[in-house]
Image (cartoon, rainbow, N blue to C red):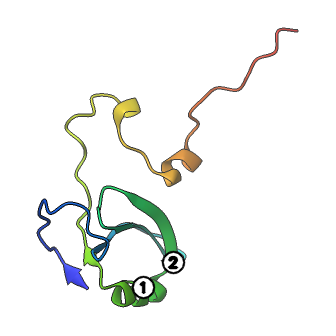
Amino acid sequence: MVEGAQLNDEGFDPSRRFVRVRRVRDDGFVEFEFAIGDPDMFVEMILPQQALAGFCAANDVVLLEDLPPSADATTEAERPWTLDDATQRRFRTPLRSDD
């Protein structure tokens, strides 16, 4: 596992793998992003902490730092969100019936 490696603009390389830890939960599970080739295109995953260590070693990942809040996002609607955000918030109002 490579920690804090500098990323360069070499384009998509499927041999490079990336992990960004999003949250360590109280129940021992770790929520993280896993990417192959490009750290901006990822899947959200969850594993027990020990399993994550093995996963990272097996995939020889580059461990990425957490992303700072985006300066481009002026409203919460413009802020990038994760699947965890979607399950914790309501994004639309319920349909109303016109009885």
Which is nearer the eye, 17 or 77? 17
Mark 2 neighbour class, 10 Å CA radius: few under 14, some 14 to 19, many 20 or more? some
Amino acid on which the number 1 mark rests in the picture: Phe
* Left or right, residue 48 beside residue 72: right
Residue 73: x and y in percent read 27, 33
Q: Residue at x 56, y 34 (%)?
A: 91
Mark 1 = which residue? 55
Which is nearer the eye, 31 or 63? 63
Q: How many marks?
A: 2
Which residue is the extreme one toward the top? Answer: 98
Which is nearer the eye, 87 or 64? 64
Q: Residue at x 49, y 48 (%)?
A: 85
Amino acid on which the number 2 mark rests in the picture: Leu
Say which quadrant the N terminus sits in.
bottom left
For label 1, the SS is: helix
Q: Which mark is residue 47?
A: 2
Mark 1 neighbour class, 10 Å CA radius: few under 14, some 14 to 19, many 20 or more? some
Residue 45: x and y in percent read 49, 68
Proximity of marks 1 and 2: CB atoms separated by less than 8 Å = yes
